[in-house]
Image: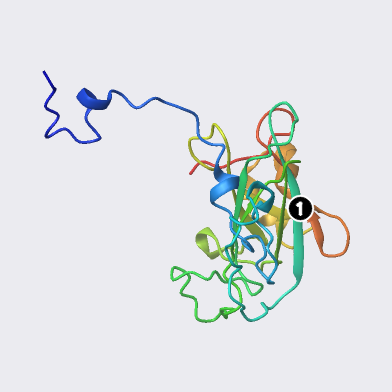
Amino acid sequence: MATDNRGLDNQSQELFGQTPSQTVGPFFHYGLPWKGGADLVGQSGMGARPDLFPPEHCVLNVAPPHARPEGEVIEITGRVIDGEGQPVPDAMVEIWQANAAGRYASPDDVRSDVPLDPGFIGFGRAATGADGVYRFRTIRPGRVPGAGNVLQAPHIAVSVFGRGLLKRLATRLYFAGGEGNEEDPVLALVPAERRATLLAEPQALGAWRFDIVLQGDGETVFFDL
């Protein structure tokens, strides 16, 4: 006799059983970064992994042209490294930051005394390459107020997504030798011996290096969400 499955939808344990569990990813680098997602100042295709797609499938266009943002253009490069010191080739890195004047492109930032920049959204997304390396082109951010209206040092909020992570890891990138680092209220919460994990180091002119260590020796400081 045939079983009557009427009334049982695709959430029914009687029909389908329990959904098998699995770790998260790796899929971020394949489906979420977009062409140009890591270039906040220009029109390049930085951010995506075209090597993962057949040429006929990699058809998305880059973002439409926009005005050139104000401020100092910088490039941020680094590796995402696992607990064994190996590069993570299938992670995704996001950034969120203020513009050069220190204002976010967000309706939550209602300060009228600090100008918005119509050419700068402040958000970017990049996949890591096969060598675990990510890259962004952006603007060096200005200082923004924190708790008690105390100015924070210039910084960029960084999120990391990767295999086995049930939620993103959140950290900050500060600039070594940056204005206000000594009195930044968030950086002051980090033990002195670990603050270096939040400091991007200068390389060539306009270039900064910021490695993200997920576990083990030199683990990057991550913040509770």
Q: In the picture, residue 114 is in which quadrant?
A: bottom right
Quarter location, residue 211: top right
Q: Amino acid at mark 1?
A: Thr
Can see residue 169? no
Q: Position of residue 27 (x, y in %)?
A: 55, 41
Residue pictured at 69% horizontal, 32% vertical = 82
**Residue assigned mark 1:** 77
Residue found 54% across the figure and 51% down from its top: 32
Estimate the x, y position of residue 189 in percent, counting from the top left: 61, 44
Query: What residue do we see at 53% from left, 36% from top?
Result: 25
In the image, farthest residue toward the right: 204
Q: Is residue 208 left or right of residue 198?
A: right
Dot 1: what SS? Answer: strand
Image height of 9 relative to 116, above or below = above
- Residue lying at 60% horizontally and 62% vertically, measured from the top left: 97
Quarter-of-image position of residue 193 = top right
Lateral position of residue 136 relative to residue 159, left or right: right
Q: Is residue 196 visible?
A: yes
The percent coordinates of residue 190 (x first, y second) are: 64, 42
Q: Residues within 10 Å of mark 1 (few under 14, many from 20)?
A: some
Quick one: 192 or 224, which is closer to the camera? Answer: 224
Q: How is the image coloured?
A: rainbow
Say left or right for 92 vs 193.
Answer: left
